[in-house]
Every structure is written in C-alpha cells, then in structure tokens.
Image: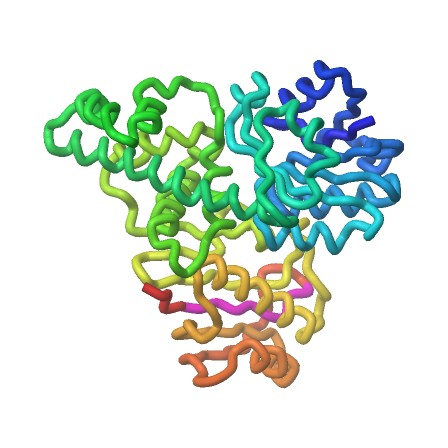
Amino acid sequence: MIAFLGQGRMGVPMARRLEAAGHKVTTWRRGTGTPVAQAVEGASVVITMLRDGPAVLEVLASALPGLRPDATVIEMSTIGPPAVTRVRELLPSSVSLVDAPVLGSVGPATDGTLTVLAGGAVEPVRELLSVFGTVRECGPLGSGAALKLAVMSAFLPAQVLIAESLAYGEAHGVSREAVLDVLAGTPLGGLSERLRDPGTETRFALGLAAKDLELAAWEGGTLATAARLRLRAAEAAGLGDRDVTAIAEHVGAGRPSRVTPINPPTVPATNGMYSHAVRTGDTLYISGQAAFDENGNVVAPGDMGAQAEHVFACLERILADQGAGFGDIAFIRSYLTDMSQAPAYREVRKRYITGTPPASTSVEVSRLFMPGLVLEVDAIVALPS
C-alpha cells in the first residue's frame, strides 16, 4: 500500500496516476482532521507532496507513530538539500528515504509526463516513480533536491526577464505580440509562448515560484535574487495564488515599487498588518521582533533570556534570507519592560553580535503590545550589494 500525503494541485493527479497503475493508495490532506499516523499505517511506501520543508517535517513527525519500520519515504516536494538532510535525521534509520522532486506542472502530472529528479537509493522505487514520468537518477540523497533548485534558478529568472522585456517594449511603443513573435524564434521561444495566452488556470503558483528561489538563494545568485524580489513583490500585491506567468501582469502595471516586503517562511507569520522586514535598495529595515510562536502565542511569558533567544533566532533567519548576517547590522534598538533584566538580554545578544558592535539604543517601556512580552528588537541592516 502507498500513502500519499498532500492533495494539492500536484498531489491529486499524481495519486490518481498511481491508482490507475493498479496501486492501492491512501491519500491524506492537511486540515481534514484525519491523523496522519493513521493514514500511513501499513504503507510500505509513503510519498510526501507538500508546500515546503517545515510542512514536510511537521507532517512526517506526526506520521512517525504509524510508520512501518521498513517503509520507504519518497519526498517529492521542493524543499532543498538542507531540509532533505533534516528529514533523514528525523526518520528512523530503518526507514529508507529518496528525494524526488519533479519538473512539470498540473498538465504533465495528469498525463504522467513529469521529469522526476531522484536522489538516494532510487532503484527499488524506480518503477513506481516511472508512473509519474521520466526518472532521472541524480546521485546521493539530496542531489535531486539540489538539481531541482538549480533548474529553477535558471527557469524562473528567465520568466521574469521576459516579463520585463514585454514591459520595456510596451513602454517604447512596441506591442506585446511583436516582442513575443520575435522571441519565438530565439532560444527563449518556449518560455515566451507561455506568456502569449496564459489563460486563467494556475499551473505553477507564483507564490511557490518565489519560495523556490528563496530556497535556491546563495551569494553568487545575483539574477535569481533579483527575480526573487520581483516575485515577492508580485506576491505581496496579491498574485501569489495566480500562475507564475502573472509576473508579466505585475511588471507591466507600472514602475516597480522601490520597497519589497520580506516575510521568510521560517519566521512565524505576521498578523497581516506589517511585514517582518522591508528592503529598499541595499538597506533592510527589520520590524520589531518579539517572542511569538507559529500560533501567535507568547513564548516563555516574562522570561527575558528565553524571549531573547527566540528574537535573535528570528533576526538570524531574516538576515540569512537576504544573504546577510549579524555583522551587517548598522543599527539595533531594544525595548525592555524591565531594565533590571538587561543582563539576561545582553548575555544572549553578545553571543549573536560579535566583533565591532553596531549603533545601538536600548529603552525601558512600561509595556509591550501583548501581556507576557518583555522584549522587542528592531534593526537596520546594510545588505551585501
């Protein structure tokens, strides 16, 4: 039996492919109330097709009580090599793991023409994976995830580049159709045709495209970084659930905003009234960070040391998302409800901020915006060019 965890746009047609091939499949969708441990009971193969690494880790951690000791987990989401390593560490050593993200959208998932990029011990599950399309063995565990992001680092910036080319042409009196006609005869022809008549169907959500480029971020990825900022701005404008081709609509809407909101998925979500950070040029403004968990609850109410650890961990993730570190902070400001607890705060801060200290202000306030909070920290960062 196969347990397929994740029934989104890609998961539904992929699970149906398995059923059509004669496999007994149990499907599970987040939010239905069915315990995931129950869904994987008795399954020799467990497939995950979820939004991101945190979702995969959360679901598999919940599945562990029902997981067979000799099961094989096939991770088919796009989560990146570090997350694959964390999945391996989470699973019992007796459970096999293959990372097998796919290239292709809903149509190829339905037709069985995806490209499966598989890493790890692929041979025992090669025939099973071939139900989805062409299987490419990439090497050791994690190599499938790495190859997927390498490909997306070329594909998505090219999509953004074409959108910018259309906007440039229209701004100078050249029709969209004329630009697309000429691009059709170039190596970019296939991608440009996607923008000729994108339709209304979401084949690959723009928000997921932005997420993929976040995972692929690295110091040398200058074009991918620029494309990621474009996609994030489009997502902030409400296009996250639209197909990635909607980037042309966003770019063509006028002068791009000089301000890009930054809300990494590794930091608990905001209430929608602010962004965790805003980037303008090479400067990053980080909003006041406080100790909240993913459910919006205060972490360790009244405990300065514990809240400081949480706050600096959030700051670290926001900085890393933009290719920066604590050494790039130009100014930091700390709000404490009780200055007598400052030594506990400083003990944590000095472990994160080493070397030459940034400009700094610390103030005592009568209270913060939620009972139990004793600390809030904001910062201004000089980003690497």
Please tell me whether residue 332 belongs to the stretch shown in magenta.
no
Does residue 170 lie above or below 87 as drawn?
A: above
Residue 279 shown left or right of residue 241 in the figure: left
The one nearer the camera, 257 or 173, is 173
Does residue 52 lie above or below 253 as drawn?
A: below
Q: Residue at x 73, y 44 (%)?
A: 97
Residue 70 shown left or right of residue 259 in the figure: right
Q: Is residue 177 visible?
A: yes
Q: How is the image coloured?
A: rainbow
Q: Residue at x 78, y 39 (%)?
A: 72
Report which quarter residue 3 is drawn in.
top right
The one nearer the camera, 137 or 351, is 137
Q: How many marks?
A: 0
Q: Position of residue 176 (x, y in %)?
A: 21, 24
Q: Position of residue 362 (x, y in %)?
A: 50, 79
In the image, which residues are magenta?
372-380
Q: Give the dominant element type of the magenta stretch: helix, strand or loop.
A: strand
Does residue 231 lie above or below 326 as drawn?
A: above
Q: Residue at x 39, y 54 (%)?
A: 221
Residue 93 shown left or right of residue 250 in the figure: right
Give the quarter of the figure containing the N terminus: top right
Q: Position of residue 257 (x, y in %)?
A: 29, 46
Please tell me whether residue 375 belongs to the stretch shown in magenta.
yes
Q: Residue furthest front?
A: 123
Report which quarter residue 348 is drawn in.
bottom right
Q: Position of residue 223 (x, y in %)?
A: 34, 49
Give the quarter of the figure containing the C terminus: bottom left
